[in-house]
Structures are given as C-alpha cells and as structure tokens.
Amino acid sequence: MQHFSLLDLSPVPEGNTAGDALRCTVELAQSAEAAGYHRYWLAEHHNMPGIASAATAVVIGHVAGATSTIRVGSGGIMLPNHAPLMIAEAFGTLATLYPDRIDLGLGRAPGTDQETMRALRRYMAPEDSFPQDVQELLGYLSDEPSGSVRAVPGQGTHVPVWILGSSLFGAQLAAHMGLPYAFASHFAPAMLDAALEIYRQTFKPSPYLDKPYAMVAAGVCAADTDEEARYLRSSQMLGFARLHTGKPGKLPLPVHDVRTEIPPHVLTGVEKALSCSATGSAESIERQLRTIIDKYQPDELIVTGMIHDHSARLRSFDIAAGVLRSLRA
C-alpha cells in the first residue's frame, strides 16, 4: 500500500443542516491533511436529504481552498449526468486554481432516480456512451484537442482521471484505457476480487500509467473501545437500511442494538453490503484493515464512514490514520 486516503459524502445528521455538514467537511479535510491522508474525495449524489455534496466540484473547490497540500477530488462525478466539456471546464478551473492537487474520478451510473435524472436535464440514450464520454473528456484535458472545441480552462491541465466502479465493466474499461481504477467496495464488495483480477491482468500501459494502480475502498468506524465503535456505526447501518427500503433521510442517531431497528432480512443485506470494513478500537481495526490489505494488495486504500457526532467522526478518522500509517510502514 503506497497511500491511504479519505472519502467524504458530507453527511447531514438528524438535527443538522446542509450548511452544518459542509462546515464539518472542511474541518474533517483539514484534520485529514494533518493526519497524513493522501487524498480527500467527495461524491456526487442527488435528491438525498442526508448528503450535502451534490454540487461536487463546488465543494471540492471549497475544500481545496481551505487546505494546502492534500489532493482533493471526486469519488466520483457521475459522468452520465453531465456533458464532458462542462466537466473538463469545471475540473480544468479547479486544476488551474490548485495546481497538482485535483483528481477526477468518474462513475458510470447516474447515481439517482429517473425523475431526478430528468430534472438534471439529461435524457439517457439507450446505448451506453460512457467509454466515448471518458475519451472525449480526456481529449479536452490534453494538450491538443482533436476538434475545434476547447475547454478553457481545461486544455493542457492533464487532470488525473480515474475510473470508478462496483462491477466488472469499470475494471475492463480502466484496464483498456490505461487509467487508475477505484472499486466501491465500501458498499458493494461482491465483485471486488474479480474486478481487481481483470484490471491487473488486462491492463494496457498508456500515457497516463505504465502499470496498473488500484484503489480499494473500506468503511471505518474507530473509537476508544469496540463497544463504542459499534454504537457509533449503527447510524450508518440505519441510514443504509432506510435508503434501501425507500426511506432515505438524514443520518440517524446511533442506537445500542440495530437488531431492534432493522428487520432481519434487511439487516442481512446491510451487513453484506458494508462487509468490507473495520470497526472497533485501534487494535481491532488494525487487524481488520490488515486482513483487507493482505487479501487485495491495493496500491491505495480509501476509507470512509458516517458517524452522527462530528467530534467522534474526527476521532475515528484520526485513529484510522495512525493505524494506516503503521500498516503502510
């Protein structure tokens, strides 16, 4: 493992506002920079009351302006929602303002429902244009665009582009195009083994990378004791269960026993989806993260986690940073 990084969805806890969430995001980014995290990524979600990072490029700019060295980027931008030129201009502007600090992770899914897609003014064609859109976007960020349309700012910025995925398609595309690849194993770990194998075995060197570079995502909830960590993690489990039963909302308050709050068949699915994770004291998460790193051999591990109490969330990622520094060494 060369680096460890942090993925933040700017969660909005119950009793808080989106403004509170964005202020907490800045404070967490500053703490992550001090703790040695390599990247701080934010993700695009729409029509979700519990996530404040919908205007992802705007939040990236705000975070980059409040920090000085940490890389800041998207994990990710949902490319089907946007014209490639507009993404090139937005991230070209960010890269111009914050040179050598901006990353652009791209997702293939719209990340929302059909009605919200219509509200985004994106009318989806029956064919999948994601590979063509990625190639078009890369062209806008290169030194010489292939056509007469130029991204200004954007042209010549060479913003690093990542392919994100939770299935085999992204792994195949990233390998074919010679791009770095990040797998969303923090909420969809089922195909992680197969995706990494495909990516590493079929990777083609490119002007962007001479060898494969794979990032694995893992959930983390750390505290001074295992019991406290399990209690804090219950907020994320409740929120995930509500989302997948059609009742999305703000991040719930933690509970001492999620089994009394989540039906057994739903809880089984939640535990499976969030299984690539580490929960507990520093000693406990070290064992769990070491298992993940030994098994998947990621070039980089990106951790994420939603905790209702902001100070406890800061503490969790600080504990995780200490563990990850030791594991990297």
Image: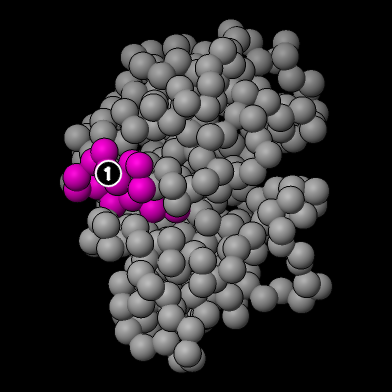
Residue 109 can be seen, yes or no: yes
Picture colour scheme: one colour
Q: Secondary structure at mark 1?
A: helix
Say which quadrant the N terminus sits in.
bottom left
Q: Quadrant of residue 319?
A: top left
As for residue 130 lying within the magenta part, the answer is no
Residue on which disc 1 sits = 65
So how many labels did they put on this image?
Answer: 1
Q: Residue at x 57, y 38 (%)?
A: 275
Q: Quadrant of residue 205?
A: bottom left
- Left or right of 248? Residue 153 is left
Q: Nearer the viewer, residue 246 or 327?
A: 246
Up-down: is 137 above or below 61? below
Q: Which x, y percent locates residue 6? A: 37, 42
Q: Which x, y percent locates residue 291? A: 41, 42
Q: Residue at x 46, y 12 (%)?
A: 227
As for residue 73 lying within the magenta part, the answer is yes
**Mark 1: few/some/many CA within 10 Å (<14, 14-19, 20+):** some
Q: Residue at x 35, y 62 (%)?
A: 93
What type is the residue that disc 1 sits on? Gly
Q: Which x, y percent locates residue 256? A: 58, 8
Q: Which x, y percent locates residue 225? A: 38, 13
Seen from this angle, which residue lies furthest top? 256
Q: Nearer the viewer, residue 18 or 167?
A: 18
- Left or right of 163? Residue 117 is right
Residue 272 can be seen, yes or no: no
Residue segment shown in magenta: 61-75
Up-down: is 116 above or below 219? below
Q: Residue at x 32, y 84 (%)?
A: 143
